[in-house]
Amino acid sequence: MTSLPKDPLLQPYHLKHLVLKNRVMSTSHEPAYSEDGMPKERYRLYHAEKAKGGMALTMTAGSAIVSRDSPAAFGNLHLYDDAIVPWLAELTDACHEHDCKVMIQITHLGRRTGWNKADWLPVLSASPVREPAHRAFPKTAEEWDIERIIGDYASAAQRCQAAGLDGIEFEAYGHLIDGFWSPATNHRDDDFGGSLENRLRFTDMVLDAVRAAVGKDFVVGIRMVADEDFAAGLSKEEGIEIACRLANSGKVDFLNIIRGSIESDAALSKVIPVTGMRSSPHLDFAGEVRAATKFPTFHAARIQDVATARHAITSGKLDMVGMTRAHIADPHIMRKVMEGREHEIRPCVGATYCLDRIYEGGEALCIHNAATGREATIPHVIARADGARKRVVVVGAGPAGLEAARVAGERGHMVTVLEAASQAGGQIRLAAQNPRRKELIGIVDWRLAELERLGVDIRYDSWAESQDVLDLEPDVVVVATGGIPQNPPLGAGDDLVTSSWDILSGAVKAAENVLLYDDNGGHQGMGAAELIANQGARLELVSPERFFAPEMGGLNHVPYMAAFHARGVTITINTRLRSVKRDGNQLVVTLGSDFADGWQATRLVDQVVVEHGTAPLDELYLALKPLSINTGAVDYERLIEGGDIFPHRNPAGSFTLYRIGDAVASRNIHAAVYDGMRFTLRA
């Protein structure tokens, strides 16, 4: 009998004295779950879930800050504070219970932060070169700064060791350490500038101090840029030379390779690609570094599927594969691989809602996994419900309805989905009409596969009236009928404008000269604008906001802006659409200002497209309300704090009723999925 080949992803990896049980890790990133700079319960549960899910190594923080003059830019942990040690120990112990090793990334942010935060200390860097993303003008690090920060690194490393962590890695891309490496940011003429040896001097001093503090056995690595990929920056040749020097120094135990620059949204999107961009764009480069150094090499950059991760190991490009956003989407990837359930892995669709939220001051949330970051209240693995099976009718198969049906099915209920269209997906299917965002359909496809596995009955082309629902004798009715596009408030011309939906669906083609007005500020309007521009139309994008698309973060902003610049799109902000009227075969648009009373401007165009969110399709919900036990009511206090969330308000009612997603109000995909999850868990 021929034995099946061993899965390379499941083979252990020996790193110094550590045995990593497989080849998959989550690289350091900052989910912004910290409280007072400490990794408390939410932070701990997030990492423990990935440990539970079977990964070999989770790296916390992105990055933990070692000095007070490196104030948190996006929820960073305060590693300069002794109070962090017991919190890190608790997190480490929770992961060790599942044989998952834990490391932490430590840094001084250098110029990648703001001066008007925390203690209002001046930002510093190797030289006074401003980073556009965080806008601070750094001072040149003086000798006493260098001495002080080296000591801070050593103290921080000792705290990590005291907490029982398995190792640390330095952050050296876009932060202080590599700020000394790069000719773009190091213009010094002292012992820390000029030659490569001088530019590495600060790094050597930090490594020496840390090794003296933690000893030779503690695992120490570095996440490093080995090619900044722009003319003035660190070259590939010098980057690989730095990697070789570090590998041969005896001071580090692994290299975690990055390519690119992160000083602007456009540059960062090449390091962290979003949907529509290349998958694993720097994997081959990381393999080059591994071949040159012959040293333990880690890497992560949009390696979102198991097949690519497996290739990275079998081809010898990497020793450990980082699948970081993929584990935000599904923290149980490796458990599913081990159990032969790869087909059940929830896919990362590259939406990058997670990181865009962080960079806009929020916390990491997956666009279609509502449990990530909410492990204290929402399970990743849904248990069967106690008691009798219920008949659950879900009306609508958009993201909210599909999630509600999935959760109800996992709980063991008998579920029927009624969908008016011939396909599931709702507005996701619209969004995926933009070829660049076609991966979003994975949100729908995964749920359809799960519903098939769970035996859920989906009935397409079923426009449900109240009697159709009642005929199914439901115990629970979930109204997920979504919404329909609505116009912004106009003084005149409601009948003359075209919705973004018409453009996205292809029902209406772009005219020659188009004005698109968007006061919703998300992907809907931007997606329509991109399609219009790509069809060759002359387009002006008008928004009343201070900047366009404020509901969309910086990484997703990049490909839209690239398309708009390439197609010559005019962008007008701080301007409101007042009215539209016909003038022969064209339309006269009147624009107004919120700032200057009486100001107005006009445009003569062929087509006006508007995006103003959706109005809920709530007729079915309103018809079923008086027949339900709870008359549609939800106890929000109990929803948040615990208890029965559906009050008994109607003794004559025969079923529990609730509505979710855009059937309630115009929101986004994550809100729809979250509604479908948290309400249905309690139904």
Image: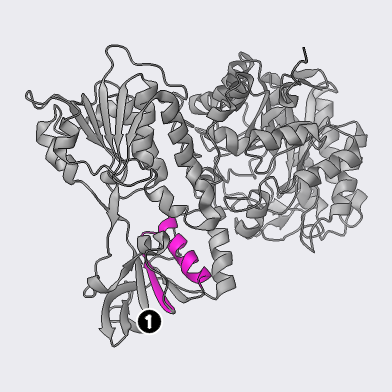
Q: Picture coordinates of residue 537 (x, y %)?
A: 48, 76
User: Quick one: which residue is furthest to the bottom in this view?
Assistant: 584
**Mark 1 Cα-neighbour bin, 10 Å: few <14, some 14–19, many ≥20:** many
Q: Is residue 672 magenta?
A: no
Q: Is residue 530 magenta?
A: yes
Q: Amino acid at mark 1?
A: Val
| Residue pictured at 39% horizontal, 25% vertical | 455
Name which quarter of the figure residue 187 lies in: bottom right
Q: Secondary structure at mark 1?
A: strand
Where does label 1 land, which residue? 605
Viewer-proximal residue, 456 or 399? 456
Image quarter in which the N terminus is found: top right
606 in relation to 34, above or below: below
Q: Picture coordinates of residue 154 (x, y %)?
A: 76, 31
Left or right of residue 469: residue 641: right
Colouring style: one colour
Left or right of residue 171: residue 337: left
96 in relation to 158, above or below: above
Q: Picture coordinates of residue 19 (x, y %)?
A: 77, 18
Q: Which residues are magenta?
A: 513-535
User: Quick one: which residue is furthest to the front in this view?
Assistant: 1
| Residue pictured at 85% horizontal, 43% vertical | 289
Q: Picture coordinates of residue 385 (x, y %)?
A: 34, 16
Image quarter in which the C terminus is found: top left
Name which quarter of the figure residue 410 lies in: top left
Whether residue 39 is visible? no
Viewer-proximal residue, 621 or 146? 621
| Residue pictured at 43% horizontal, 35% vertical | 448
140 in relation to 681, above or below: below
